[in-house]
Image: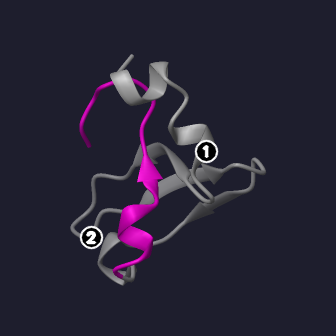
Amino acid sequence: MCQAQKKDRYDRLPETRSVTEVTRRLNPVPRWRNQDDVAGERELNEFSVRERMLPFTEGCGVL
């Protein structure tokens, strides 16, 4: 687990998306769950600048 997660810093953010999967297509589609456990997905190239700051992963892995 990474330092920020150990210190619960992600829990204090107003909005995050925990990435559960990224499809391996020509246009990757991240799938996620938000803090309210609501699932979502959308092609990565459709994310706004603000939305690109929301995805997080469990642990220290990189997507």
Q: How is the image coloured?
A: one colour
The residue under the point 36% across, 68% down is 52
Residue type beneath disc 2: Asn
**Pointer 2: what residue?**
27
For marks 2 and 1, the one nearer the N-term is 1
**Pointer 1: what residue?**
12
The residue under the point 30% across, 25% down is 60
Q: Quadrant of residue 30?
A: bottom left
Mark 2 Cα-neighbour bin, 10 Å: few <14, some 14–19, many ≥20: few
Q: Is residue 48 above or below residue 8?
A: below
Numbered marks: total: 2
- In this rendering, position of residue 13 left or right of residue 62: right
Q: Judging from the image, what secondary structure is the residue with disc 1 in? A: helix
Q: Is residue 53 above or below residue 48?
A: above
Q: Judging from the image, what secondary structure is the residue with disc 2 in? A: loop
The magenta span reads: 49-63
- In this rendering, position of residue 33 left or right of residue 57: right
Residue 63, given in percent of the width and then of the height, sits at: 26, 43
Q: Main secondary structure of the magenta part?
A: loop
Along the line of sight, the residue nearer the viewer: 55 or 21: 55
Are the residues tagged 2 and 1 within 8 Å (C-beta)?
A: no
The residue under the point 21% across, 67% down is 26
Q: Is residue 6 above or below residue 53?
A: above
Residue type beneath disc 1: Arg
Q: Is residue 35 above or below residue 41?
A: above
- Residue 24 sits inside the magenta stretch: no
Along the line of sight, the residue nearer the viewer: 39 or 4: 4
- In this rendering, position of residue 18 left or right of residue 52: right
